[in-house]
Image: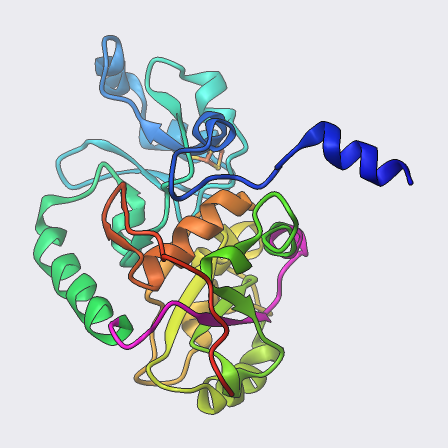
Amino acid sequence: MPWVTRGLRDGVVTTGYPRRPDPYAEELPGAVAAAVRPGAEQAGDLLDGDLLELCPTGAIGRDPAGVVTVDRGRCLLCGRCVHARPELFSWVPGNQTSRVGRTALVVPEAAEDDTTLAATRADLARRVRIFGRSVHVRHVDVGSDGTEEWEIAALTNPVYDVARLGIFFTASPRHADVLLLTGAGSWGMAEPLVRTVEATARPLVVVAVGTDAASGGLVAPGYAVAGGVAGLLPEGVAVDVWVPGSPPSPFAILHGLLLATGRLVAPGEVRAPRAAARRPR
Ligand code: SF4
């Protein structure tokens, strides 16, 4: 029985996140930032054409004031910009990359978005107040390349073990509180997604996982995709939390789920559940 000795040797492998920071998650490159640091003024010599050539998905742009921005909802984390212009672009380590509101994925964040985002966050907090310590998640693939699915599947392994936080995956939308959407938004999945949304219990929280889900990634624009999952959702239903990354790590997806279910009371501040409990059917 080698697994017994291996188990005794390895001890507890389950992460302590979110009760305490996980060193591995803290080191992972989670996002790209347009750096404001010595040498960044050299951005002035970057023409818009340079920016377009630098990034395969057009994630790099300029705001109206001419400041170089990165849309993390389009970023594939390929690293080309960091390699080519390290004085301007840098990796941001850690898993706290999820945001409420699509515009919040564009960094540096525009100050005029603050009021809108505050209202969006308040609306989400009001809807998830009813959730107890047990949340059920239904995953729907609307045109994914499969990478996000590997990361989502990892959430149930002994390292991440989201069941300890009262987060469970369910096979039926009728039992779900949260819809976890992946993929570039293929039109062929439009009707199944609408039927899934209609069958899901209310209040409903929608989480878009991955760069493809946020913008369509490399395959958008294209005849077969809506350029992200938002374009397939029926009227009156919108994405609540965006998890960027191609694919996002399990830690980043977990951060998004915690944000979506009201377990993160402020950016970086975590209120972990006291115990996991299955909700009676
Ligand atoms: S990491 Fe790649 S995809 Fe992301 S902004 Fe840089 S060049 Fe674009």
Q: Where residue 113 sits in the image (x, y, percent)?
A: 14, 53
Position of 148 with respect to 209 (left or right) is right
Look at the picture and state if 78 lies above or below 57: above
Q: How is the image coloured?
A: rainbow
Query: Which residue of the protein is positioned furthest toward the right in this rendering?
Result: 1
Q: How many labels does the image show?
A: 0
Q: Is residue 163 magenta?
A: no
* Vertical position of residue 278 compared to residue 68: above or below: below
Residue 129 pos. (x, y %)? 24, 72
As rendered, which of 199 and 218 lies closer to the eye? Answer: 199
Rendered position, 241 above or below 218: below
Question: Does residue 30 appear in this view?
Answer: yes
Identify the residue at image location x=54%, y=60%.
Answer: 163
Q: Nearer the viewer, residue 82 or 157?
A: 157
Q: Is residue 185 visible?
A: no
Residue 88 located left or right of residue 157? left
- Residue at the spot x=55%, y=87% of the render? 191
Residue 103, given in percent of the width and then of the height, sits at: 26, 53
Looking at the rendering, the stretch of residues picked out in magenta corresponds to 129-150
Residue 134 included in the magenta stretch of the image: yes
Which quadrant of the figure contains the N terminus?
top right
- The x, y position of residue 55, in whole percent, is 47, 34
